[in-house]
C-alpha cells in the first residue's frame, strides 16, 4: 500500500540502523575489555539478562512499553518538524494525576471505574502540560525544544511538592512517595513470574494507530507542515491547530505512559517516576525512524539493553552503567548512519 | 540582613561559575550555528576527569585533563554533525547519554567497592584583602575561586574576540549564513568545529569546577541538569558572552536563596527550584520577539558550505 | 599604468561537466582593461559556470584560466552575510586576528567614490535594501582590491532607475582602467552597458564580438537558436469581476484596490521590496489584511488559505520551494491540495488514501502539463527547475481555478519552459479565470498581461493597458521604489 | 519484638564451612563515601575475604525506579541474601520481598521498620539519639566555642532524633553554647551542604556538626572557612582528615555475622535489631587533636570514658524520638 519510494527506503534504513548498531556493539566491546571482561561473555550475559529467562524477557517488555508509547505519541509531531522533547515532565504529571485519581477514589471503587479514570487523568494531565509550550510556539514563536525542556523541570518540582505535601504517604516513610494505589487500580499481571502487565497491549495498539494515521490524507498534510506551513495550510492543515494538536497528542501519550508506570509497575508514585524515560522515548522515536514498526523495534532494543545490563553486572561484574553507554552509542551511530544513507540515496 | 544578602550573593557567584563557564562555551557554539545538547554529559565527564586528574597530579592537572576530554567530546560532536551531517539534537542527546554512562562506568572501575574515595585537592580561593570588606558585594566579588575570575576574564576576551577579530567575524558569519560565509572565504566547517571544541572544553571545565573548585569529591549527580541550565542561560543572554554570565547568574541567585532560606519555609522550596525555569520561559517569550538568534542555528549544514 | 587593450583575464577551451550535463564545452574568453564585457545566454547556457571558473571559485575539468589582475566575483545570488556590516565584510575570511575597522571603512569609502554611491557601511547588511546590497557587493569587491569584477545577473531585482545607476557604476570602473564581466540574459542590458559581448548556448560559445556591430534581434537569435512561437489561444472578452480587492492594508501595502475579471490577465509590476510578496500572499489568503477585504466571486477570503483554495484560488509562489515539497514524490505533490477535499482520492470505508487513484491523477497531470520525466514516483526535488515549475503550475491549474495568482511564474526558466507556462496561464484565463501575474521583470509582465498595475512602496502608482504602453520615463518614475542613500563624503 | 520465626523451611541447610553464601549488597550512595555505605561494604568484604560469602555490590540506588528491577534480578537468581542498605531502599525491599517469599532480604530503616518486616526480611536500625549525643559532647568540649552550626539532611524523624541527641550532648558539656540549624533536604548534596556551612559560619558558628550521610560537602567548606567539624566522614574527603575532630561510626560486622549464622541455622527472618555502643555496632573515630586549637588534650580520654559509660548503661539517655 505504501508508495514505491517509501517502500524502497525501509530496507535501506534498516541496513543503516543495523550497521550503526554493529558499530555501537564494537565500541561497547572495547569498553567491556577495559573492564577486564571478555566482550563475548559480556554480550552473552547482556542477552541472557534480557531474553534468557522468563523474568528477563518480561522485564525487557516492561521497560520497552513506556518508551514505545512515548515514541509513538511524539512521532507525528517530529514528522511535522515540531521538536517537542518534554515527555519526561509530561510523563511525571500524567503519573501524578493518575495516582491522585486512583488514591483519591480509594479502595471502595471497582476496577472498571479506577482503571479508566486513572488512565484518563494521566492522559489529560500529560496533554495539558503540553498546551503552554504549544501555544507559546504558535503565538510567540518560542522554540519548543527549550520550552518543553524547561517545563520538564517545573513538572518534576510539582511532583516533588505534591509528594511532600498533599499526596505524600501517611505512613511516615523516609523517602518521598504516595500511598500505594488501591489493588483494583492496578493493571493485572500478564505473565506470572514477571512484572509484565496487561498495559503492554497499548504499544501495538498505538503503533497501529500511528500506521493508520500515516496513511490518511491528514497524515500527508502533516508531513508538509514542518517544511512548508503555508502549503500545509492551503492543503487544509492549519499551522497553529496542527502544532497544538501534535504536541498535545505527544503529551497525552507520555501522560498515559506515566499511568502505565504507576498502575502497571510501581504501584506507588515516586518523585523519580520518569527517570529518563521521557528523553529516551524521544530518542527511541528517532532511532525507529519515526515509523511504527521501527519504533517498536527500537523500544525493544532500549528495553533489552536496560534489562540485560542488570544481568551483565550480576554475571560478569561489569558495571550496569555500560548499558547507558551502549544506548548512547547506538543512537550516535544511527544518527550518522541515517544521514549517510540519505545522502548516498540522493547521489544515486 | 546584610550578612544574609552577602551570603546569598556570594553563594550565587559560586553556584553560577560552573554554569556560566559552560554557557560561555555554548554561546560561542550557538553563534557558530550549532546547538549542543551534549553539554550536560560533557560537564559530567569534565567533573570526573577533573577529579581524576587532580587526585593524580594536583588541581591544575585535573583542569587540564577535563579541558582535553571536553574538547575531545566537542570534536566528536563536530565529526558527527558537520562531517557526518547527522542531526544536531540527536547527536547532542546521545553524547549526553554516552558521557553520563561512561562517567558512571569509569568511576566504578576507578573506585570499586572497598577502595577509599579519591583525595581531590581543591583549587585556591582568592581573597582580596580590603575590598572583601565592602558591604553586600564584598564577598561576592572579592573572595571567590580562581575560576570565577577566570570566567569574567573569559567573558571579556570572548566579547572582544567576537567583535574585533577575524575569528569572531568568521564565527558569526558561519552561524548566520554558512553558504554565503563559505563564498566569502570562511572555512565554515573548520570554524564550527573549533567552536564545538572550545564549547566542549568550557563545558567540561564547568564540570571540573564543581569537583575541583568546590567539592573535592565526585558522584554521578554532581552536575544535576546544570548543562541544560547553561543552554537556557545562553538564550536569556541573547547569545552574548555577558548575557550568558547574566543568565547563569539568574539561576544561581534562585538556588542560593533556596539554600540560605534553610528551614524557614516562606515559599515551598520547589517553587524556588521551578522559578528560574519559569523566568527563563518568560525571557524566551520576550527574546523570541526580538529574534536575534543566529539565523542558521540548529539547521543542518548546507551542501555547499 | 596599463594600456587599454591589455588582457586582464582569459580562459582557453574550458570544459566543465556536472554529471552527464556538460555545462561548458570548450569555451574561449578574454576580457581587456577598460572594457565592460557582457556574457549572455539562455537559462542553463553556462554563464554562471563560466563566471565561477573565471573567478577561480570552480575548477575547470579541462582548459586553462589566465589572470593578469586580481579578480572578484559578485555571484548571482548575493553573497553578503546578513548579520555583518559592509565594514566587517572587508575583514571576513581574511585571517583570524584583530582587524582594523578604521582601515576597512577607509577602503570602502575609496571604493564608494569610484562607484559613485555609498551604501551604509556600518549596519548589518540584512537591513539594507536590495539595490543597496547589490551596490554594497560591488563596493566590497573594489575595496578588496579587485581590478576585474565579474557580476552575475546583478539587475534581476532592480527597477529601471536602479539599473541605470548600476550600469553607470560599472562603466565608471571600466573608465578607471579596470574591467567588468557582466553576466546577463537581458539583451537590452548587454547592448546598453557593454563594449563587447560573448554569447553562450548549451555550454558553447556561439558568438563573440563588439556590441556596436549587433542589434537586439540578431543577439536574441544567437542566444536562442530558433524562437518557438507562442500558441495562440483565443480568449473571450473579459467577463464578470471574479476578484475584488478593496482598500487593503497589509505590511507595506497601503490602500490597495484592484479588480480582475474572468478571462483577464492583470500584471502587477514592481521592483523587489515594492510589496509584491505581500500582495501575492494576501490574494492567496496566506496573510490577513490589516484593513480592507479580498473577495473571490463575492466570497471573502481574508487570511484563510483553506477558504481561498475552496473558492478556487490557485497560487504559484515566487520560490518553487514554497510551492512544492522536494522530498516527497511527484504524486504527493500533485494531489496535495486535493487530498483532504476530494473524496474520490480516498477509500470508501477506511478513509485512507487511495494510492491507485492518486497515481492515476498524478500521471494525468504529468501528461497534460508535460512534466518530464513522466515518473510521479520520483521526489519532486529530483526534477529540473523547469519541470518542477510545470508540476507546480499544473497542480494549481488542474482543478479549473476561479482566480490565479502567479508570482514570477517563469523566473529562471528557459524560453521553452517559460512559453509553456505562459500558455498554461492564458488557457486558464480563456477558461474563465481571472489571472494575476506579479513580477519584477517588466518584460515578462508586458508579454503576458492585458492590463498592468505598477506597485511601488506598497501603493499602486500607475495603471495602463498593454496596447497603450507608456514610455520608459513614466514607467521608471512609477517603479522607482527605494531611493538610494546618497554618497556620504 | 526480636522474635525469630521462620515460616519457610526452604532455607539452605548449610554449615559454617560449607560453600560460601551468595550475598548482594545494594546501597543508596557510593560505597566509598567514607561513611554509611562504605561501612557496610567493608564489613561484607571482610566476610568475603574470610571465605564465608561471595559478594556483589550495586551502588547509587536511592531511586526506587532503579532499585526495584535490580532487587528483582538478584531475587530471581538464587542469591542467599539480598541487603538493601539505606532507608530509601527499605520500601523497595519490602515490596520485592513480598513477591519472593523464598528469598532472604535484609534492610535498614528507622524504628517504624519493625512493624513492616516480613517472614523473609530482617531489619536493622541504630540508636540515632546516642549517635548524636556523642557528637554533642565532643562539640561541647572544644574550648572557646560559643556558637555551633548544624547541617542536617532531610527533615525526617530519625534525623530529628539524632539532632536532639546532639543538642542534649552539647548542653551537657557547654550549656552556654548557642546553635543554628539548617536542613539541606537531601542526604547526598555536597554543594548544598557547602553553601549551608558558609551561611552558618558567616552567622558566627565556630564549629559545624554534620548530621548528614557523610558530610562530604561540609568538610571542604569548613576547611575553607577555617572552622573544625564533628561528624564528617574522615575517609570521605581530604578536607575531613584535616578539620574533623571525631565522628561516630557504625560497625556492621556483627550485624552481618548474625545474618549468616541465622541463615545457616535456618532461623533467618522477621528479626529487628538496634545498633548501639553496647553491642559495639556504634563506634567512635579516634580524636584528631590537630583539627582545631581549642581541642583539649584529654578529649580522647573523655570520649573513651563516655563511650564506656553509655555502653555499660551507667549513663542512660532519654528517648529522643
Ligand atoms: N553545481 C551544479 N551541479 C550540477 N549541475 C550544475 C551545477 N551548476 C550548474 N549546473 C548545470 O550546468 C548548466 C549550466 O549552468 P549555469 O548555472 O552556468 O547556467 P546559467 O547560464 O548561469 O543559467 P541561469 O541564467 O539560469 O543563471 C545547467 O544545466 C546547470 O543545471
Ligand atoms: N537533486 C537532484 N537529484 C537528482 N537529479 C537532479 C537533481 N537536481 C537536478 N537533477 C537533474 O539534473 C539535470 C539538470 O538539472 P537542472 O535543474 O540544472 O536543469 P536545467 O537544465 O536547468 O533545466 P530547466 O530548464 O528545466 O531548469 C536534470 O535532468 C535534473 O533531473
Ligand atoms: Mg546563472
Ligand atoms: Mg534550471
Image (tube, rainbow, N blue to C red):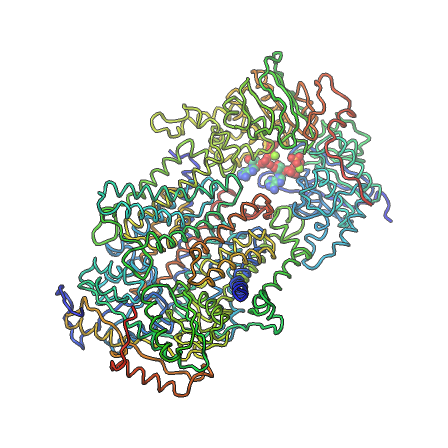
For the N terminus of chain A, the image quarter is top left
| Above or below, comparing residue A58 to residue D87 in the picture | above
Residue A40 position, x and y percent, is 33, 62
* Image vertical order of residue B135 relative to residue B268, above or below: below
Using the image as rendered, state which of residue C292 and residue B131 is in the foreground: B131
A307, above or below C128, in the image: below
What x and y, as percent, mark residue D67?
Answer: 31, 60
Task: Report which quarter residue C32 is drawn in.
Answer: top right
Q: Is residue B67 visible?
A: no
Q: Assign ligand 3 to one image quadrant.
A: top right
Res C197 visible: yes
Seen from the viewer's position, the closer of residues C136 and C210 is C136
| A348 vs D177, nearest the viewer | D177
Residue D241: quarter of image = bottom left
Place of residue C388 in the rendered image (x, y in percent of width and height, measured from the top left): 55, 31
C419 left or right of A213 in image:
right
Q: Is residue A144 above or below residue B247?
A: above
* Left or right relative to B287: residue D60: left
Q: Is residue C371 left or right of residue D285?
A: right
Q: Nearer the viewer, residue C359 or A106?
A: A106
Amino acid at each position: 500500500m505504501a508508495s514505491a519510494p517509501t517502500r524502497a527506503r525501509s530496507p535501506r534504513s534498516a541496513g543503516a540502523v543495523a550497521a550503526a548498531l554493529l558499530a555501537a556493539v564494537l565500541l561497547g566491546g572495547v569498553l567491556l575489555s577495559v573492564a577486564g571482561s571478555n566482550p563475548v561473555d559480556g554480550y552473552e550475559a547482556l542477552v541472557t539478562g534480557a531474553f534468557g529467562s522468563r523474568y528477563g524477557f518480561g522485564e525487557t517488555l516492561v521497560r520497552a512499553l513506556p518508551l514505545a508509547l512515548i515514541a509513538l505519541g511524539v512521532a507525528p509531531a517530529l514528522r511535522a518538524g515540531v521538536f517537542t522533547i518534554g515527555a519526561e515532565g509530561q510523563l511525571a504529571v500524567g503519573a501524578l494525576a493518575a495516582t491522585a485519581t486512583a488514591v483519591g477514589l480509594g479502595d471502595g471503587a471497582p476496577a472498571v471505574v479506577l482503571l479508566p479514570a486513572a488512565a484518563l487523568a494521566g492522559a489529560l494531565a500529560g496533554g495539558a502540560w503540553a498546551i503552554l509550550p504549544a501555544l507559546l510556539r504558535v503565538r510567540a514563536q518560542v522554540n519548543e525544544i527549550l520550552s518543553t525542556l524547561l517545563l520538564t523541570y517545573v513538572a518534576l518540582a510539582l511532583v516533588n511538592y505534591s509528594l511532600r505535601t498533599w499526596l505524600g504517604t501517611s505512613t511516615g516513610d523516609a523517602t518521598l512517595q504516595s500511598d500505594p494505589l488501591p489493588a483494583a487500580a492496578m493493571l493485572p499481571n500478564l505473565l506470572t513470574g514477571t512484572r509484565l502487565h496487561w498495559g503492554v497491549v497499548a504499544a501495538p495498539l498505538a503503533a497501529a494507530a500511528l500506521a493508520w494515521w500515516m496513511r490518511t490524507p491528514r497524515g500527508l498534510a502533516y508531513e508538509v507542515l514542518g517544511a512548508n506551513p503555508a502549503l500545509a495550510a492551503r492543503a487544509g492543515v492549519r499551522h497553529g491547530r496542527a502544532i497544538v494538536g501534535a504536541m498535545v497528542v505527544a503529551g497525552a501519550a507520555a501522560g498515559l505512559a506515566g499511568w502505565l508506570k504507576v498502575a502497571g509497575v510501581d504501584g506507588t508514585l515516586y518523585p523519580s517516576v520518569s527517570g529518563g524515560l521521557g528523553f529516551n522515548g524521544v530518542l527511541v522515536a528517532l532511532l525507529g525512524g519515526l515509523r511504527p514498526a521501527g519504533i517498536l523495534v527500537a523500544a525493544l532494543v532500549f528495553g533489552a539493553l536496560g534489562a540485560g545490563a542488570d544481568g551483565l553486572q550480576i554475571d560478569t561484574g561489569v558495571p550496569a552503567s555500560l548499558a547507558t553507554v551502549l544506548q548512547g552509542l547506538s543512537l550516535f551511530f544511527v544518527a550518522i548512519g541515517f544521514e549517510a544513507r540519505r545522502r548516498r540515496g540522493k547521489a544515486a | 540582613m546584610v550578612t544574609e544578602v552577602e551570603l546569598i550573593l556570594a553563594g550565587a557567584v559560586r553556584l553560577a561559575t560552573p554554569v556560566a563557564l559552560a554557557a560561555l562555551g555554548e554561546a560561542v557554539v550557538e553563534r557558530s550555528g550549532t546547538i549542543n545538547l551534549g553539554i550536560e554529559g560533557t560537564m559530567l565527564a569534565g567533573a570526573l576527569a577533573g577529579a581524576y586528574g587532580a587526585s593524580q597530579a594536583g588541581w591544575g592537572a585535573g583542569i587540564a585533563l577535563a579541558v582535553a576530554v571536553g574538547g575531545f567530546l566537542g570534536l566528536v560532536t563536530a565529526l558527527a554533525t558537520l562531517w557526518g551531517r547527522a542531526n544536531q539534537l540527536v547527536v547532542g542527546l546521545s553524547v549526553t547519554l554516552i558521557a553520563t554512562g561512561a562517567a558512571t562506568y569509569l568511576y566504578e572501575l576507578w573506585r570499586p567497592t572497598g577502595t577509599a574515595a579519591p583525595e581531590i585537592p581543591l583549587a585556591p580561593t582568592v581573597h582580596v584583602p580590603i575590598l572583601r570588606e565592602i558591604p553586600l558585594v564584598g564577598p561576592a566579588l572579592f573572595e571567590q575561586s580562581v575560576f570565577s575570575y577566570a570566567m569574567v576574564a573569559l567573558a571579556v576576551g570572548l566579547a572582544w574576540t567576537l567583535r574585533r577579530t577575524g575569528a569572531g567575524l568568521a564565527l558569526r558569519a558561519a552561524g548566520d549564513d554558512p553558504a554565503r560565509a563559505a563564498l566569502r572565504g570562511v572555512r565554515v566547517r573548520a570554524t564550527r568545529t573549533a567552536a564545538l571544541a572550545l564549547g566542549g572544553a568550557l563545558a567540561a571545565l564547568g564540570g571540573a569546577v564543581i569537583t575541583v573548585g568546590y567539592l573535592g569529591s565526585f558522584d554521578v549527580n554532581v552536575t544535576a541538569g546544570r548543562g541544560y541550565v547553561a543552554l537556557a542561560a545562553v538564550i536569556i543572554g541573547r547569545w552574548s558572552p555577558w548575557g550568558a554570565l547574566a543568565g547563569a547568574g539568574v539561576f544561581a541567585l534562585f538556588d542560593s536563596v533556596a539554600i540560605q532560606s534553610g528551614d524557614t519555609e516562606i515559599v515551598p522550596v520547589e517553587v524556588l527550584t521551578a522559578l528560574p525555569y519559569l523566568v527563563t520561559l518568560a525571557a524566551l517569550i520576550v527574546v523570541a520577539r526580538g529574534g536575534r538568534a543566529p539565523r542558521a542555528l540548529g539547521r543542518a549544514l548546507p551542501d555547499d558550505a | 599604468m596599463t594600456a587599454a587593450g591589455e588582457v586582464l583575464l582569459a580562459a582557453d577551451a574550458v570544459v566543465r561537466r556536472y554529471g552527464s550535463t556538460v555545462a561548458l564545452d570548450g569555451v574561449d574568453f578574454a576580457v581587456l582593461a577598460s572594457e565592460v564585457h557582457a556574457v549572455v545566454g539562455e537559462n542553463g547556457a553556462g554563464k554562471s559556470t563560466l563566471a565561477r571558473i573565471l573567478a577561480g571559485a570552480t575548477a575547470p575539468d579541462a582548459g586553462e584560466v589566465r589572470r593578469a589582475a586580481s579578480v572578484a566575483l559578485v555571484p548571482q545570488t548575493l553573497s553578503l552575510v546578513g548579520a555583518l556590516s559592509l565594514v566587517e565584510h572587508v575583514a571576513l575570511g581574511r585571517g583570524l586576528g584583530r582587524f582594523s575597522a578604521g582601515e576597512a571603512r577607509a577602503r570602502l569609502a575609496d571604493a564608494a567614490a569610484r562607484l559613485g554611491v555609498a551604501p551604509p557601511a556600518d549596519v548589518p547588511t540584512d537591513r539594507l535594501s536590495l539595490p543597496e546590497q547589490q551596490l554594497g557587493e560591488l563596493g566590497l569587491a573594489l575595496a578588496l582590491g579587485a581590478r576585474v569584477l565579474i557580476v552575475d545577473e546583478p539587475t534581476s531585482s532592480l527597477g529601471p532607475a536602479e539599473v541605470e545607476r548600476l550600469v553607470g557604476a560599472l562603466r565608471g570602473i571600466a573608465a578607471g582602467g579596470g574591467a567588468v564581466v557582466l553576466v546577463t540574459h537581458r539583451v537590452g542590458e548587454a547592448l546598453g552597458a557593454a563594449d563587447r559581448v560573448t554569447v553562450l548556448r548549451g555550454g558553447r560559445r556561439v558568438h563573440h564580438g563588439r556590441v556596436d556591430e549587433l542589434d537586439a534581434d540578431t543577439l536574441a537569435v544567437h542566444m536562442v537558436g530558433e524562437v518557438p512561437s507562442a500558441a495562440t489561444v483565443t480568449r473571450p472578452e473579459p467577463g464578470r469581476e471574479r476578484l475584488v480587492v478593496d482598500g487593503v492594508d497589509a505590511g507595506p501595502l497601503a490602500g490597495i484596490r484592484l479588480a480582475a475579471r474572468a478571462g483577464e490577465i492583470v500584471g502587477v509590476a514592481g521592483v523587489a521590496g515594492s510589496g509584491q510578496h505581500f500582495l501575492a500572499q494576501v490574494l492567496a489568503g496566506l496573510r490577513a489584511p490589516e484593513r480592507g477585504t479580498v473577495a473571490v466571486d463575492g466570497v471573502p477570503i481574508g487570511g484563510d488559505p483553506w477558504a481561498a483554495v475552496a473558492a478556487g484560488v490557485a497560487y504559484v509562489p515566487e520560490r518553487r520551494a514554497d510551492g512544492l515539497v522536494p522530498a516527497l514524490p511527484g504524486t504527493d505533490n500533485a494531489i496535495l491540495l486535493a487530498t483532504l477535499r476530494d473524496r474520490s482520492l480516498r477509500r470508501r470505508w477506511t478513509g485512507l488514501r487511495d494510492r491507485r487513484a492518486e497515481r492515476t491523477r498524478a500521471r494525468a497531470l504529468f501528461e497534460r502539463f508535460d512534466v518530464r520525466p513522466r515518473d510521479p514516483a520520483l521526489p519532486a526535488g529530483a526534477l529540473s527547475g523547469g519541470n518542477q515549475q510545470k508540476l507546480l503550475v499544473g497542480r494549481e491549474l488542474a482543478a479549473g481555478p476561479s482566480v490565479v495568482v502567479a508570482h514570477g511564474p517563469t523566473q529562471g526558466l528557459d524560453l521553452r519552459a517559460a512559453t509553456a507556462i505562459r500558455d498554461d496561464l492564458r488557457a486558464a484565463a480563456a477558461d474563465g479565470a481571472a489571472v494575476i501575474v506579479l513580477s519584477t521583470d517588466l518584460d515578462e509582465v508586458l508579454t503576458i498581461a492585458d492590463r498592468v498595475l505598477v506597485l511601488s512602496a506598497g501603493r499602486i502608482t500607475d495603471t495602463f493597458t498593454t496596447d497603450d504602453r507608456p514610455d520608459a520615463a513614466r514607467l521608471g518614475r512609477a517603479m522607482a521604489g527605494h531611493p538610494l542613500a546618497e554618497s556620504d563624503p | 519484638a526480636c522474635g525469630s520465626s521462620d515460616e519457610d523451611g526452604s532455607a539452605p541447610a548449610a554449615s559454617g564451612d560449607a560453600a560460601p553464601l551468595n550475598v548482594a549488597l545494594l546501597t543508596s550512595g557510593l560505597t566509598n563515601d567514607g561513611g554509611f555505605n562504605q561501612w557496610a561494604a567493608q564489613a561484607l568484604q571482610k566476610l568475603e575475604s574470610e571465605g564465608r560469602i561471595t559478594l556483589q555490590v550495586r551502588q547509587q540506588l536511592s531511586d526506587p525506579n532503579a532499585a526495584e528491577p535490580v532487587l528483582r534480578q538478584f531475587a530471581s537468581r538464587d542469591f542467599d541474601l539480598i541487603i538493601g542498605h539505606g532507608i530509601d531502599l527499605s520500601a523497595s525491599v519490602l515490596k520485592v520481598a513480598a513477591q519472593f517469599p523464598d528469598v532472604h532480604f535484609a534492610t535498614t530503616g528507622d524504628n517504624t521498620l519493625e512493624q513492616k518486616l516480613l517472614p523473609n526480611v530482617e531489619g536493622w536500625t541504630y540508636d540515632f539519639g546516642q549517635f548524636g549525643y556523642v557528637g554533642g559532647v565532643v562539640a561541647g568540649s572544644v574550648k572557646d566555642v560559643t556558637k555551633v552550626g548544624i547541617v542536617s539532611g532531610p527533615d525526617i524523624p530519625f534525623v530529628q532524633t539524632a539532632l536532639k541527641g546532639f543538642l542534649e550532648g552539647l548542653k551537657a558539656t557547654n550549656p552556654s553554647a548557642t546553635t543554628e540549624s539548617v536542613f539541606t533536604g537531601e542526604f547526598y548534596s555536597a554543594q548544598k551542604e557547602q553553601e549551608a556551612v558558609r551561611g552558618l559560619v558567616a552567622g558566627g558558628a565556630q564549629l559545624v556538626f554534620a548530621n548528614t550521610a557523610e558530610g562530604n560537602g561540609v568538610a571542604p567548606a569548613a576547611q575553607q572557612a577555617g572552622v573544625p567539624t564533628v561528624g564528617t566522614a574522615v575517609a570521605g574527603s581530604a578536607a575531613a582528615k584535616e578539620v574533623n575532630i571525631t565522628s561516630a561510626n557504625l560497625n556492621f560486622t556483627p550485624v552481618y555475622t548474625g545474618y549468616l549464622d541465622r541463615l545457616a541455622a535456618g532461623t533467618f527472618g522477621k528479626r529487628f535489631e538496634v545498633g548501639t555502643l553496647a553491642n559495639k555496632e556504634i563506634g567512635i573515630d579516634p580524636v584528631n587533636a590537630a583539627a582545631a586549637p581549642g581541642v583539649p588534650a584529654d578529649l580522647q580520654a573523655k570520649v573513651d570514658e563516655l563511650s564506656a559509660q553509655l555502653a555499660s548503661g551507667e549513663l542512660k539517655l532519654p528517648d529522643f524520638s
